[in-house]
């Protein structure tokens, strides 16, 4: 189960430490998308986010850094994630191949190998004023 903060489901990006600090800063500076493995929802006993849902963005210190509102939810196979979505994550990917390579490496390091058919939850959101 994901953390709950101030009555909201928590959104923790990446892994704790430098990566989470970097990804949280990207969101706070205006980036508006993130991708996750659909299988993680079942593993964690969580439902997929829905349009209009508000989430607590949790920083590396476990603090409620911002509230985001879900503006788009799409589930697609890994091979069908678009470069437009990858760009909106704001991580500096130069091509969709670069995005796929870095995300596959990340998930493999976390214990999950992905292939072209692995289902990816592509979330779009906006940061709400605190």
Image: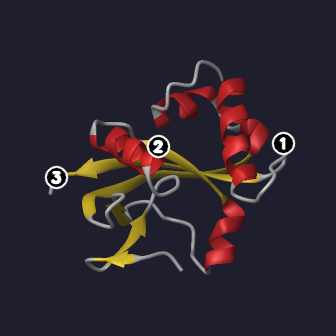
Gap in angstroms between the C-alphas marked 2 and 3: 17 Å
Q: Are marks 2 and 3 in contact (CB under 8 Å)?
A: no
Q: Residues within 10 Å of mark 2 (few under 14, many from 20)?
A: many
- Badge 3 marks a residue whose secondary structure is loop
Which residue position is annotated with label 2?
33
Task: Out of 19 and 37, give the one closest to the viewer.
Answer: 19
Quadrant in the picture for residue 28:
top left
Would residue 66 be found to the left or right of residue 101 on screen? left
Q: Disc 1 designates what residue?
A: 116
Instruction: State the SS at label 2.
Output: strand
Q: Are marks 2 and 1 in contact (CB under 8 Å)?
A: no
Q: Residue at x 47, y 46 (%)?
A: 19
Q: Position of residue 76 (x, y in %)?
A: 71, 48
Image quadrant in which the N terminus is located = bottom right
Residue 75 image offset from top left, x and y in percent: 66, 53
Q: Please provide percent x and percent y for residue 62.
A: 33, 67
Report helix, strand or loop for mark 1: loop
Label drawn at residue 129: 3
Give percent across and percent down for residue 13.
47, 54
Please tell me whether residue 5 is drawn above or below residue 116 in the rendered image. Answer: below
Q: Return the residue nearer the eye: 10 or 117.
A: 10
Quadrant where the C terminus sits is bottom left
């Amino acid at each position: 189960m994901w953390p709950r903060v101030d009555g909201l489901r928590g959104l923790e990006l990446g892994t704790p430490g430098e990566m989470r600090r970097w990804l949280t800063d990207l969101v706070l500076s205006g980036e508006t998308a993130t991708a996750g493995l659909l299988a993680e929802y079942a593993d964690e006993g969580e439902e997929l986010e829905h349009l209009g849902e508000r989430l607590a963005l949790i920083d590396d210190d476990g603090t409620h850094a911002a509230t985001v509102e879900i503006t788009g939810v799409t589930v697609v196979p890994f091979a069908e994630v678009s470069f437009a979505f990858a760009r909106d994550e704001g991580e500096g990917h130069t091509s969709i191949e670069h995005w796929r390579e870095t995300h596959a490496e990340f998930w493999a390091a976390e214990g999950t190998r992905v292939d072209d058919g692995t289902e990816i939850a592509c979330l779009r959101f906006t940061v709400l004023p605190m």
